[in-house]
Each structure stands twice: as C-alpha cells, then as structure tokens.
Image (tube, rainbow, N blue to C red):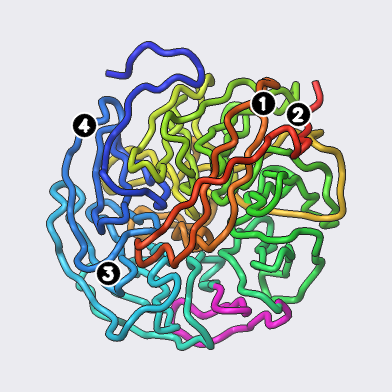
Amino acid sequence: MLNETEPGEVHWKYETRTWIRSSPTTSNGTVFVGNSSGQVHAIDLATGQNRWEATLPNGSVKASPAIDADRVYAGNNAGYFAALDRASGEEVWSISVDGRYTLGGLTSSPLVYQQTVYVGMHDGKLYAIDASSGEVQWAFQTGSQIETSPIAVDGTICIGSGNDLYAISSGDGQEQWVVTEPSEPVRTPSEHDGKLYFTSKGGTVYAVDGTDGTVEWTNSGYYRLDSTPTVYEDSLYLGLSSGPDGLANIDTDTGEEQWVSGTGDVFGSPTVAGGTVFFCNELGNIFAVDLDSEEYAWTFRSESRERMRSSPTVVDGVLYVGSDDGLLYAVDAGIDASSVGSRTEDRSLGYHTQTKTVAQQESSTDGQQEPKTANGPSDSTETSGAGGANSPSSGGQNGGLSPWAMGAGGSTVALMGYLFGKKALDGESTSGESDRESVDEDTMDRDEDTVNLDEDTLDLEEPDG
C-alpha cells in the first residue's frame, strides 16, 4: 500500500540502476518504463515492487513503452524492437533494423492503432507492424532519420522526420501530405480539435490543419524547443529547454504567448490533474502549480539533483516520473485526480489507461497547463498534451486502444547544453550545481563538468500570487 505522505513527498522510489529518459506508461496497477541499460521494467503502482524486467540487447530504451491488452511494445537505440508479454515480460516477437545508428537512435515511441504497431526507426522509415505476429505490413521511407513518435488522427499517421512533418495513410502507407516549412528538426506533434501542434529544435511553434497540413500560425520567439506541446483547454503548454525560463503558455487560436514561467530548462512535457499543472526540470525539481490561484502548491527536489527529462504522469493522486539518477519516483501529487490533456489522450510522452477489463481499456493520460502569470508575456510560444482523466477516449477503438494513441519520448532527444542554476520557487536559493554534456548521450560515454552558477544572477521571477 502507498505510504501516508504529504503533497510533494515520496511514496516510494524504484531503482533501475541507470538513467531513465522514458516516460512512465501506466495501466491496471502497473507502471512500465525503460532505462539506458536497455531494460523495460514493470512495477507495481501501489508498492513500487518489481513485477518483471526484460532486456532489449545492445542499446538503451529512451522512448516510452506502448501497451495493449496483452503486450508491451518497446524499442532501443540499436534498432531492436520487441513485443513483450504484458504479464511476464517474455519476448513474443521482435524485429531489428540493420545498420549503425546515429545521434538519437530509436527514440520513437510506438503507437498501437487498430491492431497495428507504428514506430519510427533510425533508417528513416515508419514501420507498420502486425501487433499479433510482428510481420511488417509496410514501411514508409521519409527523408531523414526519425527521432519523433507517431500519432493517429482519423486514419492518418502523423510523424516528424528531420525538418518535415508527414501524414501517412494507416492502411496502405501512402503519403497524404507533408509540411516542409520548418528549417530545423521537428518534434513530436500533438492533436487537438482538428489541429496539429508541434515545435522545431530552432525554437518555432507550429499550428497546422490536421486534414491537409496547411500552416495556420507560427511563433518563433524561442531559442530551443525539445518537448512535445501539451494542449489543455485553449492553451499550449511548452517546456523551454534553453535559458532561465522553463514553461510557456500559448493561445491555441492565435499562437500568442500568454505568459512564461522562470524555472530553468524543461525537456519533458508537463501534465495537468485536479486543476494543477506538474512539470520537471534539469536540476531534479518537480513543480506543482495551482491553476486557479497561480501559486506553487509544492515543489520537490531529488537528493541527486540529476536532470529529469522523463515526462510525468499522475494516476489517482500520485505523480510518477523517471530521473537520470536511475530512479522512478512516486510522489504525492496533493490532489485526488489523474492526468488529463491532449498529450495523454494521443499517448505521447507517457500516458495512463484504466481498464474495465483487460481487453476493454479506457484512455486517461496526461495533459499540461501552466500558471497564467509567471514571468509576464514575451514574444514567443511552446508545448503539448490531451485527454480526459478516467474517461473513454474520443473516436472508435480497435483492440482496446484509442485512435489517438501515440508513442512517447521521441521529442526529448538529449543534446549538449548547460544546466542553469535557479532559485527555489519558495524564494530560497539553492546551490547552483549544474553539469554539461561533452559527448553524445546516446553512446552513454559522458564527461560531466560541474559548473558553479550564481543563481541570483539569473533573476528568475516567481509566479504572481
């Protein structure tokens, strides 16, 4: 059983031994997550005890697993993709893409849609794989390596590759349209009310028509964006991965920024539950902001202060998130609710499902939202999410999964960068320790230098209220 805790306190910690970039996927009392040792772990939600673990050979599991009634689907950055028995973790089938992987490897999270598993590989192909047999039904060749995750929208699979966003027919793998406007690599999109929202590494946010790919608006006010946008009500919530600002709120209709929050680099996507937005940053902090009062409800800092690039999800009042210290944290969220928002409904960057029976699942998942007056308006925009907590997903289902099902983790590819020291949200200073990557993270051969930053020089503002 869960321990008696206060908001922001840890219920339990589960050790996987090596860093976790995979966002947690939860269903039927179990949370599934991958780590850099190539392992997929199944963990009891209530106790934090191991149910099973399986190893995918020769690579790290950076993207989030996908699930259906019987299996768990996961891949690693060596091009190995497998279906595991959901109860035991035993391998049912696998495929392997030949050739050496480059930066990013297989960081595409799988999508389960109408008895088919869709996943992007480092060879630049989107694969459609029969969920039962593992037989490849078709493969669509894009123009670049795929580092994003697919989503399904009305029978179309949308996925980013290089600087382009593709829409591909789920049935026969034929291209429907492609957006070529971005000049930087694009990130995993999120869908809401017929529009697709996505970011590019160069700091631009895009809104496109989901039926033909027409660009409706752009916002180019950011320096760098790595996360998937979360849509909640009439706002996009974006993690800002460079600079003292951490999150932005953007109007979904106009693309105008409504506010930003100064919390430091945020690579993962936030989630919303019980009127509170939750997000993590590069110094091992978790933040909870009440959306009505626009005040910080609580904060948590891990003892290791290792970066958190896993996107959090909330299930029945408990927040689950992975960290570079190799721990999966279960933290009292301080609310009695589960994640909502478009990112979780389309199953990007971790999600939550509840099932009436093992074969009949209801989609819940996490959304995101932010305090409405953080640092005040600036000239930019940002990030992702969708879905209603504890409610069936919209659209028809096949095999117990929503047509909005989506992979996760592809938008959080780790690149070189500084970590910024920052003020604690309660106004107290923290020791501004931060580290810099000097080599490719995907090789796991990293040299980390400690940089002492004076946090007060960053002049971070706290939310109003």
The answer for how far apart the CA atoms under marks 3 and 4 are is 26 Å
Structural distance between the alpha carbons of marks 2 and 3 = 43 Å
Task: Classify mark 1: helix, strand or loop.
Answer: loop
Q: Which marked residue is nearer to the observer: mark 2 or mark 3?
A: 2
Query: Alpha-carbon neighbours of circle 3 within 10 Å: few (<14), some, or many (≥20)?
Result: many
Residue visible at 58% across and 48% down in the picture: 419
Tag shown at residue 462:
2
Judged from the image, the secondary structure of the residue bearing numbered disc 4 is: loop
CA gap, disc 2 and disc 4: 37 Å
Whether residue 334 sits left or right of residue 182 in the image: it is: left
Q: Is residue 179 magenta?
A: yes
Q: Give the spatial CA distance, label 4 vs label 1.
A: 32 Å
Would you call the spot at circle 1 few (<14 residues within 10 Å), some (14-19), or many (20 or more)?
some
Which residue is identified by label 1?
425
Q: Residues within 10 Å of mark 2 (few under 14, many from 20)?
A: some
Q: In the depicted view, which residue is nearer to us: 353 or 80?
A: 80
Q: Earlier in the sequence, mark 2 or mark 4?
A: 4
Question: Which residue is under mark 3?
Answer: 81
Q: Give how far across and how far down residue 221 sits, in percent.
A: 81, 59
Numbered disc 3: secondary structure: strand
